[in-house]
Amino acid sequence: MQYDVIIIGAGPGGIFSAFELQKLAPNKRIALFDMGHALEKRKCPIDGDKIKSCIGCKSCSIMSGFGGAGAFSDGKYNITNDFGGTLYEHIGKKKALELMHYVDEINMAYGGEGTKLYSTAGTKFKTICIQNKLNLLDASVRHLGTDINYVVLENLYNHLKDKVDFRFDTPVRHVKKTEEGFEISTDDETYSCKECIVSVGRSGSKWMETVCKEMGIPTKSNRVDLGVRVEIPAVVFSHLTDELYESKIVYRTEKFEDNVRTFCMNPNGIVVNENTNGIVTVNGHSYEDPAMKTENTNFALLVAKHFSEPFKDSNGYGESIARLSNMLGGGVIVQRFGDLVRGRRSTEKRIEEGLVRPTLAATPGDLSLVLPKRVLDGIIEMIYALDRIAPGTANDDTLLYGVEVKFYNMEVELDERLESKHKGLYIIGDGSGITHSLSHASASGVYVAREIAEKEITA
Ligand SMILES: Cc1cc2nc3c(=O)[nH]c(=O)nc-3n(C[C@H](O)[C@H](O)[C@H](O)COP(=O)(O)OP(=O)(O)OC[C@H]3O[C@@H](n4cnc5c(N)ncnc54)[C@H](O)[C@@H]3O)c2cc1C
C-alpha cells in the first residue's frame, strides 16, 4: 500500500501533524499507525476493586492508542519555553510559542472552549517564593482536565477519521529507507510512503533506539529525573493552585546544590500508576468536572540526574531504581513523610490513621530503600522549603509515592526542520527527546506538517 505520508504514533505529536497536513495538503494520502487501541477501546483494567494494580497488558491503555500518553492526562497545556522540552533550540522561541498558541486555539475549537487559562504573569507568589529560596517559573497553563481533554480528542478523531487511514493495534516494526521514500513494516504488511513522521513518545523509546541504530541516526542520552509524588490535603496548596493552577517551582538544595523541582501539579486530583515498558511508576491527574474532584492535591518532586562519560544508559539507571520499588512493593510504594524522616517504613495501619486519604492503592513501605540518598535528601529539604510557603506540606501525614521517574528519550540528531539525516524522515514529540509535554509535542507535529506541505507548494 502506498501513501504520501505515514505517521507512526497517534499521540499529540502524530494527531497534530495529521490535523495540519490534511488541512494544508488535503490531496495527500495519509496513514496513521498506532500500536495501541482506538480511543473508545482504551480502558485500564485497574478498578481499585478486583484489580488493584498494574497487570501488564500487552498494550497499556494509559500510554498507548489514540491520544497517546496524553489521553487520560490532566490536560495541562503549558504555553512556555521554560519547561516541557527544548523544541525552541531547533525552531526558535518565537515560533515555538506561536505554534503552542495555535494548538491551544484548535483545542478550544474542538471542545475545550470555556476552560481556564492560568498565568504566572504579575503574581505575588513570585516574590513570596524568592523570599523563601524558591524559584517560580513563568508560564501560561490551560487546564483542560482529564474529562475535557478526552472530549477534545474525540472531536479531533471524528474530524480526521474520513481524511486519514487510521490503523490501531498495529505496531510498526521497521522503517527502511528506499529510493522513493520509506518502507514501513508491521507484523502483517509492508507499506510505502514518500515521507514519514515518527512520533512514538515515551512508550516507543526502546523501539526508537532500535530504529536509530538500524538507520544509523546519531543519538545522545544523559538524563533521567527521579523522585516521588507528594499527596497532601488540597487546602494546603489551594492559595497557589486557585490562582496559578500549576506552579513550577525550583529549589536549590543547601546540602548538595542540586535542583529539585515540582512537576505536574494536580489540584483535587488523583495519583495513578504508569506503566512504561513493564515498569510501574507513579503519576497523577485531575478532572475538570467538580463531581470528580478529590480532597487532595498531588504533585511530583523530581531531581534531575545527569551522567557523564563513560555511562550512557540514564534510562536504564532510572529503570533499575523503579524496578527496585516494584520488587519491594509489587508496584508503587507509599510512605508517610513522618515515617520517612523517622527512618521507619509505613504500615497499612499508620496510613489509615493518617489525615491524608490515599487516592492510589499502593504498598506501604520505605522509600529510603529505593531512592539514592542524595535524591531523597534533596526531596526532604524541598518539602521543608515548600512548607514555608504552604504550611502543612511537611506534616507527618503527607504521603509520598515512589517512584516517579521521568524518562527522557535519547535525543535524536535532527536539523532545524526536525528532519533526520534521511531526507523525508521527521522525528517529533517525546520520541525525539526534544519535547516532554503535550504542548511541545503538539507544536512539533504542526511544525513538520507545515514543512511537508510547504515542500509541495514550492515543488
Ligand atoms: C498520566 C500522564 C499524565 C500526563 N500529564 C501531562 C500534562 O498534564 N501535561 C503535559 O504537558 N504532559 C503530560 N503528560 C505527558 C504527555 O502526555 C506527553 O508529553 C505527550 O503525550 C507526548 O506526546 P507524543 O505524541 O510525543 O507521544 P505519546 O503521547 O507518548 O504518543 C506516542 C504514541 O505512539 C505509539 N507508538 C509507540 N511505538 C509505536 C510503534 N512502534 N508503532 C506504532 N505506534 C507506536 C504509542 O502507542 C502512543 O500512542 C502526561 C503523561 C502521562 C502518562
Image (cartoon, helix red, strand yellow):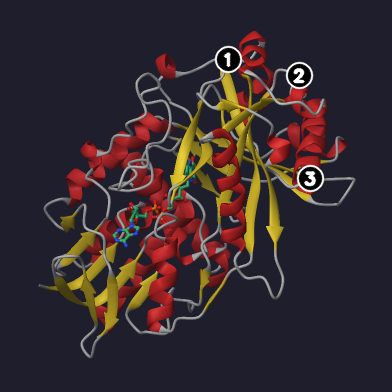
- Label 3 is placed on what type of residue? Lys
- Ligand 1 within 8 Å of disc 2? The answer is no
Residue farthest to the front, as pictured: 327
Which residue is the site of mark 2? 396
Q: Secondary structure at mark 1?
A: loop
Distance from disc 3 to disc 1, alpha carbons, whole Å, reads 27 Å
Q: Are marks 3 and 2 in contact (CB under 8 Å)?
A: no
- Ligand 1 within 8 Å of disc 3? The answer is no
Which residue is the site of mark 3? 373
- Label 2 is placed on what type of residue? Asp
Q: Secondary structure at mark 3?
A: helix
Q: Tell me: 227 left or right of 256.
A: left
Distance from disc 2 to disc 1, alpha carbons, whole Å, reads 13 Å
Q: First in sequence: mark 2 or mark 1?
A: 1
Residue 32 sits in quarter: bottom left
Rendering coords of residue 242 (x, y %): 60, 24
Q: Tell me: 8 left or right of 322.
A: left
In the depicted view, which residue is nearer to us: 407 or 55? Answer: 55
Q: Tell me: 215 left or right of 350.
A: left
Name which residue lies at 37% across and 57% down.
13
Label of residue 357 in the image: 1
Q: Are marks 3 and 1 in contact (CB under 8 Å)?
A: no
Which quadrant of the rendered structure holds the C terminus? bottom left
Position above or below: 225 against 216: above
Distance from disc 3 to disc 2, alpha carbons, whole Å, reads 20 Å
Residue 234 sits in quarter: top right
Position above or below: 257 against 456: above
Q: First in sequence: mark 3 or mark 2?
A: 3
Name which residue lies at 42% across and 25% down.
52
Position above or below: 254 against 43: below
Name which residue lies at 56% across and 53% down.
319
